[in-house]
Image (tube, coloured by chain):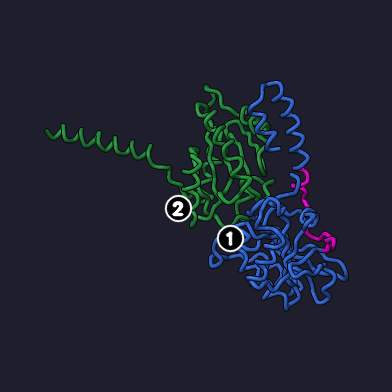
Amino acid sequence: MKKAMKKIYLLGSVSVMLMGLVAVFAFKNTNEIIVDKGYAIGDVVTDFKLKSTTGKTVSMVENRSAKGYIVIFTCNHCPFSKAYESRIMALDKKYASQGYPVLAINPNDPAAYEEDTFENMQAVAKAKNYSFEYLQDETQNVARAFGAARTPSAYVVKREGDKFIMQYIGGIDDNTQDANGVTKRYVEDAVNSLLAGKPVVANVTKSVGCAIKWKGV
Amino acid sequence: MFLKRFFSTFFLTLYLSGFQLFSQPEKVVIVKFEDLQKMINSSSDTTLVVHFWATWCRPCVEEIPFFEKMNKEYSNQKIRFLMVSMDFPKDVQDKVAPFLEKNKINSEVVLLDEPDYNAWIDDVDKDWSGTIPATLILNTTMRKRVFFEGQINQEAFTKELKAMIPTAGDN
């Protein structure tokens, strides 16, 4: 599509219009996939099976002791994900023992970002000694189902029997650059509420991050 | 004598300030959302293009030449392009300024220092999820606003912008 865009500017007026139409349609199609809204609060989240950097295949239902999960779409290359890395590790340290472990999922097309290959995911997980599963969403279907558009994007799901119910969608906290400047801990507040048997108050927040690179777009 | 000295100093100062303006890359002003909101909400017949980007955002960087080109193309119209960087304020010297210099960016650039994204994203546009690039075209006099999330459809953007060029007599 980018190449087509460039051509548009080089070619004459008639072909410009024709190709413009083609480009518009191409854009519309890809846009529908990306802007798919995904799960809403209260929706049942379909379980997934993803490859972990540990070599295991991980699904949500397998871990019987989990009361739920903190699902975070993140990756290696994105500066905003990097800024949150230690806070994601801290979330798992704090909440895994209370029944809400972190599941980190890298949805990026590794062909677009060398840093986001499975090998590099393994290297980072090992070097930083991740206590949580770092999963690769190779088909990008899980990110699509969640409606994730950027990294980092956080979700909190609660187990009800063998089902998982969406409880929180949004940012991790209110200060990406400066962990010491955080005043609202959105994910922590959500998990704390669930642990106390209360509903999540701020259950949807908006955040900025690196756009997920979709395959074939 | 006094007058002569006064004038020579005066012109020297004028010359120097002019020289500085042209030889130095423009400084990136750090703004709060309040400042941005004032620009967005102020009643004006000028059409404002607010483009949210960051040096670390590859899809943003890819389309910056397009916005530069548009800015040049419409420089004689009442259209103001404002490139709002979402880079961290700590990176303004080491990343943003060198990026602008290297890529010869002449558009007006500000850096938005407002870390609680959830507090203001909806105020830019309800439909904005927070993904960048994102672009807002608005004209308060015409009561028109168009919002784009993600890489811009250049055809659609140009069409919308053309429809929002203020005419000379508009006020």
Q: Which residues are magenta?
A: A31-49
Residue A193 shows in this picture: no
Image quarter of the N terminus of chain B: top left
| Relative to B46, A139 lies left or right | right
Characterize the local packing of mark 1: few (<14), some (14-19) or many (20 or more) Cα atoms within 10 angstroms: many
Q: Which chain is green?
A: B
Q: Quadrant of residue A187?
A: bottom right
Q: Which residue is mark 2?
A: B93
Mark 1 or 2: the one toward you: 2
Q: Quadrant of residue A182?
A: bottom right
Q: Nearer the viewer, residue B117 or A141?
A: A141
Q: What's the residue type where badge 1 is placed?
A: Thr
Residue at the (62%, 48%) spot, across then down: B58
Q: Residue furthest left?
A: B1
Residue at the (71%, 29%) spot, across then down: A20
Q: Chain of mark 2?
A: B
| Relative to B144, B81 lies left or right | left
Q: Which residue is mark 1?
A: A176
* Magenta run includes residue A46: yes
